[in-house]
Image (cartoon, helix red, strand yellow):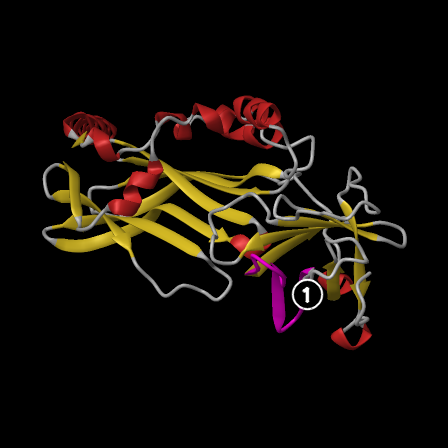
Amino acid sequence: MIGSILSCKKTQGNSLNKNVSQEINLNKNWIGDIIISDLSFVKSINTSCKLDTPFFGRSDKKIKEDNTKCVLSKIKYDYSKLNSLQTKTFIGSIPPEIKLFIKKHQQEKAKDVDLEYQTYLYIEKNKIISDSVIIYESINYSEALTVKNRYYYLNKDKIYLLDFVEDESGSSVEKWSEHKIDLNGKISLIKQEIIANQNTSIKSDNNSWEGIYWLYPYDLNSQKVGNYYVNFFNDNKEFGFSGENEFNYKINYNSVDNKLYIFDLDDASSKNPLAIIYKGKDKYYIKSNLIKLERSDVKETKNGYQINWAKSSDDVPDSPQ
Protein backbone atom coordinates (compact mmCIF):
# COMPACT_ATOMS: atom_id res chain seq x y z
CA MET A 1 0.00 0.00 0.00
CA ILE A 2 2.77 2.43 0.97
CA GLY A 3 4.60 1.51 -2.22
CA SER A 4 1.48 2.31 -4.23
CA ILE A 5 1.16 5.74 -2.60
CA LEU A 6 4.84 6.58 -3.22
CA SER A 7 4.53 5.39 -6.81
CA CYS A 8 1.45 7.54 -7.28
CA LYS A 9 3.18 10.61 -5.85
CA LYS A 10 6.22 10.04 -8.07
CA THR A 11 3.99 9.73 -11.14
CA GLN A 12 2.15 12.93 -10.21
CA GLY A 13 5.48 14.73 -9.69
CA ASN A 14 6.82 13.64 -13.06
CA SER A 15 3.56 14.69 -14.70
CA LEU A 16 3.73 18.10 -13.00
CA ASN A 17 7.33 18.68 -14.15
CA LYS A 18 6.41 17.61 -17.68
CA ASN A 19 3.41 19.97 -17.80
CA VAL A 20 5.46 22.86 -16.41
CA SER A 21 8.20 22.25 -19.00
CA GLN A 22 5.63 22.30 -21.79
CA GLU A 23 4.28 25.66 -20.60
CA ILE A 24 7.68 27.41 -20.68
CA ASN A 25 7.92 29.87 -23.53
CA LEU A 26 11.10 31.85 -24.15
CA ASN A 27 11.65 34.77 -26.51
CA LYS A 28 13.39 33.17 -29.49
CA ASN A 29 15.40 36.34 -30.12
CA TRP A 30 17.47 35.62 -27.01
CA ILE A 31 17.77 31.84 -26.67
CA GLY A 32 21.09 31.45 -28.53
CA ASP A 33 21.97 28.70 -31.00
CA ILE A 34 20.62 25.16 -30.58
CA ILE A 35 23.90 23.67 -31.84
CA ILE A 36 25.51 24.61 -28.48
CA SER A 37 23.47 21.80 -26.89
CA ASP A 38 24.99 19.20 -29.25
CA LEU A 39 27.94 17.57 -27.47
CA SER A 40 29.15 15.84 -30.64
CA PHE A 41 29.44 19.28 -32.27
CA VAL A 42 31.38 20.57 -29.26
CA LYS A 43 33.82 17.66 -29.35
CA SER A 44 34.59 18.31 -33.01
CA ILE A 45 35.72 21.92 -32.48
CA ASN A 46 39.31 21.25 -31.40
CA THR A 47 40.15 19.10 -34.41
CA SER A 48 38.27 21.05 -37.08
CA CYS A 49 39.29 24.53 -35.89
CA LYS A 50 43.01 23.94 -35.36
CA LEU A 51 45.07 25.83 -37.95
CA ASP A 52 47.57 23.83 -39.98
CA THR A 53 49.44 26.96 -41.13
CA PRO A 54 50.56 30.12 -39.27
CA PHE A 55 47.70 32.53 -38.46
CA PHE A 56 49.41 35.52 -40.06
CA GLY A 57 50.28 35.70 -43.72
CA ARG A 58 47.41 33.46 -44.84
CA SER A 59 45.83 34.29 -48.19
CA ASP A 60 42.15 35.27 -48.39
CA LYS A 61 41.49 31.89 -49.97
CA LYS A 62 43.21 30.05 -47.09
CA ILE A 63 41.32 32.09 -44.48
CA LYS A 64 38.03 31.20 -46.19
CA GLU A 65 39.01 27.51 -46.27
CA ASP A 66 39.96 27.52 -42.56
CA ASN A 67 36.70 29.23 -41.59
CA THR A 68 34.64 26.76 -43.62
CA LYS A 69 36.44 23.75 -42.15
CA CYS A 70 35.93 24.96 -38.56
CA VAL A 71 32.58 23.75 -37.22
CA LEU A 72 32.12 27.02 -35.32
CA SER A 73 31.04 28.42 -38.69
CA LYS A 74 27.81 26.43 -38.22
CA ILE A 75 26.77 28.79 -35.44
CA LYS A 76 24.20 31.14 -36.98
CA TYR A 77 23.09 33.07 -33.90
CA ASP A 78 24.65 36.54 -33.63
CA TYR A 79 25.87 36.65 -30.04
CA SER A 80 27.42 40.10 -30.53
CA LYS A 81 23.94 41.66 -30.46
CA LEU A 82 23.97 41.04 -26.70
CA ASN A 83 26.60 43.79 -26.46
CA SER A 84 23.94 46.35 -27.40
CA LEU A 85 21.54 45.48 -24.56
CA GLN A 86 20.74 48.66 -22.68
CA THR A 87 18.33 47.47 -19.97
CA LYS A 88 17.26 44.31 -18.19
CA THR A 89 15.28 42.33 -20.76
CA PHE A 90 12.48 39.88 -19.94
CA ILE A 91 12.82 36.69 -22.03
CA GLY A 92 10.25 34.27 -20.52
CA SER A 93 8.85 32.55 -17.46
CA ILE A 94 8.59 29.17 -15.78
CA PRO A 95 5.11 28.72 -14.30
CA PRO A 96 3.93 29.54 -11.82
CA GLU A 97 6.31 32.09 -10.20
CA ILE A 98 9.68 32.20 -12.00
CA LYS A 99 10.71 34.83 -14.52
CA LEU A 100 13.87 34.98 -16.64
CA PHE A 101 15.76 38.15 -17.55
CA ILE A 102 19.02 38.92 -19.30
CA LYS A 103 21.19 41.95 -18.68
CA LYS A 104 24.54 43.20 -19.94
CA HIS A 105 27.07 43.46 -17.13
CA GLN A 106 29.59 46.27 -16.87
CA GLN A 107 32.72 45.87 -14.80
CA GLU A 108 36.11 47.50 -14.47
CA LYS A 109 38.40 46.28 -17.21
CA ALA A 110 41.55 44.43 -16.17
CA LYS A 111 44.91 45.87 -17.23
CA ASP A 112 45.62 43.14 -19.78
CA VAL A 113 42.11 43.21 -21.28
CA ASP A 114 41.23 45.42 -24.25
CA LEU A 115 37.55 44.57 -24.73
CA GLU A 116 35.18 42.76 -22.39
CA TYR A 117 31.49 41.94 -22.73
CA GLN A 118 29.31 39.90 -20.36
CA THR A 119 25.62 39.07 -20.24
CA TYR A 120 23.94 37.48 -17.23
CA LEU A 121 20.81 35.37 -17.06
CA TYR A 122 18.87 36.30 -13.92
CA ILE A 123 16.30 33.98 -12.36
CA GLU A 124 13.61 35.72 -10.32
CA LYS A 125 11.06 34.06 -8.07
CA ASN A 126 8.35 36.23 -6.57
CA LYS A 127 10.27 39.31 -7.86
CA ILE A 128 13.40 38.34 -5.92
CA ILE A 129 16.59 37.21 -7.70
CA SER A 130 17.06 33.56 -6.74
CA ASP A 131 20.06 32.75 -8.97
CA SER A 132 22.14 34.00 -11.91
CA VAL A 133 24.79 32.83 -14.35
CA ILE A 134 26.99 34.36 -17.05
CA ILE A 135 25.61 33.05 -20.33
CA TYR A 136 27.62 35.17 -22.77
CA GLU A 137 31.16 36.47 -22.50
CA SER A 138 33.79 37.82 -24.88
CA ILE A 139 37.15 38.93 -23.46
CA ASN A 140 39.84 40.21 -25.83
CA TYR A 141 43.47 40.03 -24.71
CA SER A 142 45.01 41.74 -27.75
CA GLU A 143 48.61 41.63 -26.49
CA ALA A 144 48.35 37.86 -26.20
CA LEU A 145 46.23 37.62 -29.37
CA THR A 146 43.62 35.66 -27.44
CA VAL A 147 39.84 35.94 -27.16
CA LYS A 148 37.96 33.97 -24.50
CA ASN A 149 34.30 33.32 -25.29
CA ARG A 150 31.21 31.85 -23.69
CA TYR A 151 28.18 31.03 -25.86
CA TYR A 152 24.87 29.61 -24.67
CA TYR A 153 21.59 28.00 -25.63
CA LEU A 154 18.37 28.16 -23.59
CA ASN A 155 15.78 25.42 -24.05
CA LYS A 156 12.82 25.76 -21.70
CA ASP A 157 14.35 25.15 -18.23
CA LYS A 158 17.73 23.95 -19.60
CA ILE A 159 20.88 26.07 -19.99
CA TYR A 160 23.80 24.95 -22.19
CA LEU A 161 27.13 26.79 -21.92
CA LEU A 162 30.19 26.54 -24.16
CA ASP A 163 33.55 28.08 -23.17
CA PHE A 164 36.13 28.30 -25.93
CA VAL A 165 39.28 30.22 -26.80
CA GLU A 166 40.48 31.76 -30.06
CA ASP A 167 44.20 32.42 -30.58
CA GLU A 168 46.85 32.23 -33.30
CA SER A 169 46.68 28.42 -33.30
CA GLY A 170 42.93 28.33 -33.98
CA SER A 171 39.89 27.78 -31.75
CA SER A 172 39.63 25.26 -28.92
CA VAL A 173 37.09 24.27 -26.27
CA GLU A 174 37.77 24.67 -22.57
CA LYS A 175 34.47 23.46 -21.11
CA TRP A 176 30.88 22.55 -21.97
CA SER A 177 28.08 22.21 -19.43
CA GLU A 178 24.36 21.54 -19.14
CA HIS A 179 22.27 23.10 -16.34
CA LYS A 180 18.65 23.04 -15.19
CA ILE A 181 16.45 25.66 -13.52
CA ASP A 182 14.33 24.04 -10.81
CA LEU A 183 10.97 25.21 -9.42
CA ASN A 184 12.76 27.04 -6.58
CA GLY A 185 14.51 29.26 -9.11
CA LYS A 186 17.91 27.64 -8.57
CA ILE A 187 20.36 26.59 -11.28
CA SER A 188 21.87 23.13 -10.88
CA LEU A 189 24.60 21.42 -12.91
CA ILE A 190 23.45 18.30 -14.77
CA LYS A 191 26.46 17.47 -16.90
CA GLN A 192 29.91 18.90 -17.61
CA GLU A 193 32.69 18.08 -20.07
CA ILE A 194 36.24 19.41 -19.71
CA ILE A 195 37.85 19.09 -23.12
CA ALA A 196 41.64 19.10 -23.39
CA ASN A 197 43.16 21.75 -25.63
CA GLN A 198 45.70 20.33 -28.04
CA ASN A 199 46.13 23.59 -29.95
CA THR A 200 49.57 24.75 -28.91
CA SER A 201 52.05 27.24 -30.23
CA ILE A 202 55.67 27.93 -29.36
CA LYS A 203 56.21 31.43 -28.07
CA SER A 204 59.64 32.93 -27.81
CA ASP A 205 61.03 35.03 -24.98
CA ASN A 206 59.94 38.64 -25.52
CA ASN A 207 63.15 39.90 -23.89
CA SER A 208 65.12 38.38 -26.77
CA TRP A 209 63.59 41.00 -29.10
CA GLU A 210 64.64 44.00 -27.01
CA GLY A 211 66.48 46.76 -28.86
CA ILE A 212 66.21 49.27 -31.70
CA TYR A 213 65.53 48.25 -35.30
CA TRP A 214 65.97 50.70 -38.17
CA LEU A 215 66.04 50.87 -41.94
CA TYR A 216 67.22 53.83 -44.06
CA PRO A 217 64.98 53.84 -47.18
CA TYR A 218 67.07 56.09 -49.46
CA ASP A 219 70.31 55.60 -51.40
CA LEU A 220 73.27 56.03 -49.07
CA ASN A 221 74.51 59.11 -51.01
CA SER A 222 71.08 60.77 -50.77
CA GLN A 223 70.61 63.99 -48.81
CA LYS A 224 67.19 62.85 -47.58
CA VAL A 225 66.73 62.12 -43.91
CA GLY A 226 64.54 59.65 -42.10
CA ASN A 227 64.47 56.06 -40.90
CA TYR A 228 61.86 53.40 -40.43
CA TYR A 229 62.27 52.27 -36.85
CA VAL A 230 60.96 49.93 -34.19
CA ASN A 231 61.77 50.67 -30.56
CA PHE A 232 61.17 47.57 -28.48
CA PHE A 233 61.79 48.13 -24.77
CA ASN A 234 59.79 47.39 -21.63
CA ASP A 235 58.85 51.05 -21.18
CA ASN A 236 58.65 52.06 -24.85
CA LYS A 237 57.30 50.09 -27.80
CA GLU A 238 56.68 51.95 -31.05
CA PHE A 239 56.88 51.63 -34.83
CA GLY A 240 57.30 54.62 -37.11
CA PHE A 241 59.08 56.68 -39.73
CA SER A 242 61.08 59.82 -38.90
CA GLY A 243 61.32 61.47 -42.34
CA GLU A 244 58.87 63.20 -44.68
CA ASN A 245 55.32 61.89 -44.17
CA GLU A 246 56.37 60.66 -40.75
CA PHE A 247 54.17 58.39 -38.66
CA ASN A 248 54.34 56.79 -35.23
CA TYR A 249 52.35 53.92 -33.71
CA LYS A 250 52.36 52.79 -30.12
CA ILE A 251 52.32 49.04 -30.47
CA ASN A 252 51.17 45.73 -29.08
CA TYR A 253 53.04 42.62 -30.11
CA ASN A 254 53.04 38.86 -30.22
CA SER A 255 56.13 36.71 -30.64
CA VAL A 256 55.79 33.25 -32.14
CA ASP A 257 58.87 31.18 -32.89
CA ASN A 258 61.27 33.51 -34.73
CA LYS A 259 58.72 36.17 -35.70
CA LEU A 260 57.60 39.32 -33.90
CA TYR A 261 54.13 40.50 -34.94
CA ILE A 262 53.54 44.23 -34.39
CA PHE A 263 50.02 45.67 -33.94
CA ASP A 264 48.53 49.14 -33.53
CA LEU A 265 47.85 49.60 -29.80
CA ASP A 266 44.85 51.85 -30.57
CA ASP A 267 43.17 49.31 -32.85
CA ALA A 268 42.57 46.31 -30.62
CA SER A 269 40.09 44.74 -33.04
CA SER A 270 42.56 44.44 -35.91
CA LYS A 271 44.01 41.00 -36.63
CA ASN A 272 46.39 42.32 -39.30
CA PRO A 273 49.86 43.32 -38.07
CA LEU A 274 51.44 46.65 -39.00
CA ALA A 275 54.73 44.83 -39.46
CA ILE A 276 56.45 41.50 -38.90
CA ILE A 277 60.09 41.21 -37.83
CA TYR A 278 61.80 37.94 -38.73
CA LYS A 279 64.84 36.75 -36.82
CA GLY A 280 67.36 34.77 -38.89
CA LYS A 281 70.57 33.15 -37.71
CA ASP A 282 72.45 36.46 -37.43
CA LYS A 283 70.18 38.90 -39.29
CA TYR A 284 66.80 40.58 -38.87
CA TYR A 285 64.20 41.30 -41.55
CA ILE A 286 61.05 43.42 -41.57
CA LYS A 287 57.92 43.14 -43.69
CA SER A 288 55.30 45.89 -43.77
CA ASN A 289 53.03 47.55 -46.31
CA LEU A 290 53.98 50.87 -44.71
CA ILE A 291 57.62 50.59 -45.78
CA LYS A 292 58.55 52.20 -49.12
CA LEU A 293 62.18 51.89 -50.26
CA GLU A 294 63.98 54.02 -52.83
CA ARG A 295 67.44 52.52 -52.41
CA SER A 296 68.65 50.00 -54.98
CA ASP A 297 71.13 48.04 -52.86
CA VAL A 298 68.50 46.47 -50.58
CA LYS A 299 66.30 43.79 -52.11
CA GLU A 300 63.10 42.42 -50.60
CA THR A 301 63.29 38.75 -49.61
CA LYS A 302 60.48 36.36 -48.68
CA ASN A 303 60.95 37.58 -45.08
CA GLY A 304 61.00 41.26 -46.03
CA TYR A 305 63.86 43.76 -46.03
CA GLN A 306 67.00 43.25 -43.98
CA ILE A 307 66.94 45.66 -41.06
CA ASN A 308 69.59 46.94 -38.66
CA TRP A 309 69.50 46.19 -34.94
CA ALA A 310 71.21 47.75 -31.92
CA LYS A 311 70.91 47.08 -28.21
CA SER A 312 70.30 50.75 -27.40
CA SER A 313 70.23 54.21 -29.01
CA ASP A 314 73.84 54.72 -27.96
CA ASP A 315 74.84 51.99 -30.39
CA VAL A 316 73.09 53.52 -33.41
CA PRO A 317 75.57 55.16 -35.84
CA ASP A 318 75.07 58.75 -36.98
CA SER A 319 75.51 58.00 -40.69
CA PRO A 320 72.89 56.10 -42.73
CA GLN A 321 73.29 52.34 -43.11
Tag 1 residue:
232
Asked if residue 238 lies in the magenta stretch, the reply is yes
Q: Position of residue 230 (x, y in %)?
A: 68, 61
> Magenta residues?
228-248
> Up-down: is 53 above or below 251?
above
Asked if residue 212 lies in the magenta stretch, the reply is no
What's the residue at 69%, 30% (across, down)?
A: 52
Which of 187 and 64 lies nearest the eye of the viewer?
A: 64
Q: Position of residue 184 (x, y in %)?
A: 20, 47
The residue carrying pointer 1 sits among few (fewer than 14), some (14 to 19) or many (20 or more) residues within 10 Å by Cα, namely many
> Up-down: is 191 above or below 76?
below
What's the residue at 14%, 28% (across, down)?
A: 23
Which of 37 and 297 lies nearest the eye of the viewer?
A: 297
Residue 253: name its quadrant. Answer: bottom right
Which of 90 and 133 lies nearest the eye of the viewer?
A: 90
Residue farthest toward the bottom in the current orientation of the protein: 314
Q: Main secondary structure of the magenta part?
A: strand
What's the residue at 77%, 48% (across, down)?
A: 295
Q: Position of residue 200 (x, y in %)?
A: 68, 43
Which of 244 and 139 lies nearest the eye of the viewer?
A: 244
> Up-down: is 51 above or below 102?
above
**Residue type of the residue flagged with mark 1:** Phe
Left/right of residue 193 with respect to residue 285 in the rendered view: left
> Quarter of the image containing the N terminus?
top left
What's the residue at 19%, 45% (across, down)?
A: 101
Disc 1 is placed on an element classified as: strand
